[in-house]
Amino acid sequence: MDVSVPPQPVPDADTQGFWEATAAGELAICRCKECRLWMQPPLEHCRLCGEATEFEAVSGDGTICSFTVIHHPAVPGYLEDLPYVVAMVELVEQEGLLLPTRLLDGKPGETRIGQQVKLEITELPGGNYRVPTFRTVRPAD
Ligand SMILES: [Zn+2]
């Protein structure tokens, strides 16, 4: 494995819609067709009402809920970006709807819980898939 190159995702039945949307430049999250609950990670059936789910595009607006600074790479790629910030972003669509993501402009010591962030889809080398990443709307004071 070339550790300098991030891997392409390997979608399964539950995540196919997610990765197809990001490849098309959108962030889509699993949502119940019946009670409209958003679910991340995606599920085939709603965890509340048991009905079928579908993927629906979201705004891409969110808030940093928690974060960690990566000093030693846990996944291949982004070596030139070390140290970088991986954040749990709470999407505005629903309280507690969390997406783990790389923060493109996240700097150790400057990233804050509660910062507003905005989706920015990032290209991946070696294939058609892309990943949802985020950037702070306004840098920390
Ligand atoms: Zn439901």
Image (tube, rainbow, N blue to C red):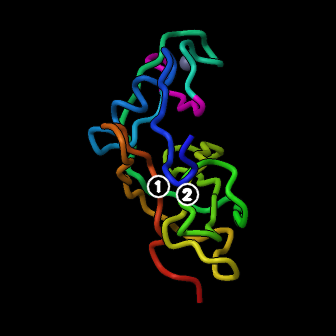
Q: Are marks 1 and 2 in contact (CB under 8 Å)?
A: yes
Q: Which residue is mark 2?
A: 102
Image quarter hosting the C terminus: bottom right
Question: Would residue 126 appear left or right of 90 to someone viewing this image?
Answer: left
Q: Residue 122 appears in which quarter of the rendering?
A: bottom left
Question: Looking at mark 1, is its residue's CB closer than 8 Å to ligand 1?
Answer: no
In the rendering, which numbered label is found on residue 133? 1
Q: In the rendered image, which quarter is residue 120 located in?
A: bottom left
Q: Residue at x 58, y 71 (%)?
A: 115
Q: Is residue 80 above or below residue 60?
A: below
Q: Write down the region rendered in magenta.
A: 31-41
Residue drawn 57% across and 72% down? 106
Question: Which quadrant of the figure shows ligand 1?
Answer: top right
Sequence-wise first label, 1 or 2: 2
Question: Is the stretch drawn in magenta largely helix, strand or loop?
Answer: loop
Residue 69: mark: none
Residue 78: image x %, image y %? Answer: 53, 60
Q: Secondary structure at mark 2?
A: strand
* Residue 61: percent from left, percent from top: 44, 57
User: Vertical placement of 83 versus 55: above or below?
Assistant: below
**For the residues marked 1 and 2, what is the alpha-carbon distance in whole angstroms?**
5 Å
Give the image location of residue 33, x and y in percent: 43, 18
Residue 29: within the magenta? no
Q: Is residue 35 magenta?
A: yes
Place of residue 36 in the rendered image (x, y in percent of width and height, measured from the top left) = 48, 26
Q: Height in image: 81 above or below 37? A: below
Residue projecting furthest to the front:
1
